[in-house]
Image (spheres, rainbow, N blue to C red):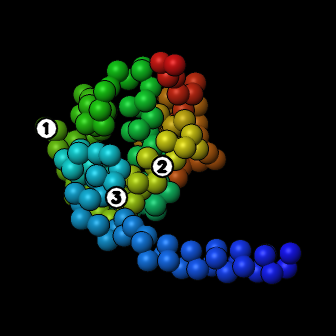
Amino acid sequence: MIKTAALLISIVIMFNSQLAKFEAPDFLQMSVEARASELGLETSEFILFSSVVEAESDRSDSLEGRILIAEVILNRLNDPRFGCDSITEVLTAPGQFSTVRHGQSVTNRTDLSDEAVRIAISEVENGTAPAVLFFNCIGYNYGEPYGDGPIDGNYFMTYGGIQTDE
């Protein structure tokens, strides 16, 4: 019994060391095209998404604030009350994101915003993202407050949870 357990442990250790050689490259070491592909997005949509997260975060926020901004965007995509079929439609909806002008972001993306988009997509897909649908920098003015106060200068709000078509 002890020999069998020791043999199994040896096999697991050997397998894990071999598996480490075949790990995917770190997300932030990938090209922008590879990052977009990894997330199932077109490159242009990924660039716009990350750029808007960067711009809306006022370029001074932590990763946490950026993730929440990205989750607002993804939650709006998944909520039929917003009537959007793509991330680009969410971002370019009239009167919604002041940092988008003529379909373009006023700021360039950064690695930190790219990482926030990656994490937000994962959390939304896994069902662990909060149901945030709105944010602004002036205070709670719509829906229900999320959190105990501003996060990186932004107030996040929910609105009766995320609705789905299911």
Please give the residue where the numbered disc 1 appears in the rendered image.
102
Q: Quadrant of the N terminus?
A: bottom right
Coordinates of residue 100 in the picture (x, y in percent): 22, 41
- Name the spot of residue 31 as percent of width and height, x first: 24, 65
Q: Specify which label sits upstream in the sequence, 3 or 2.
A: 3
- Residue at 23% across, 45% down: 42
**Above or below, 156 relative to 37:** above
- Say if 163 sits above or below 65 in the image: above
- The answer to whether residue 103 is seen in the rendering is yes
x, y (%) of residue 105? 21, 47
The disc placed on residue 114 is: 3
The residue drawn where x is 52% and y is 52% is 151
Residue at left offset 39%, top offset 60%: 115
Would residue 54 be visible to someone looking at this image? no
Counting residues from the N terminus, which is met first, the one under dot 2 or under dot 1? 1
Nearer-the-camera pick, 142 or 114: 114
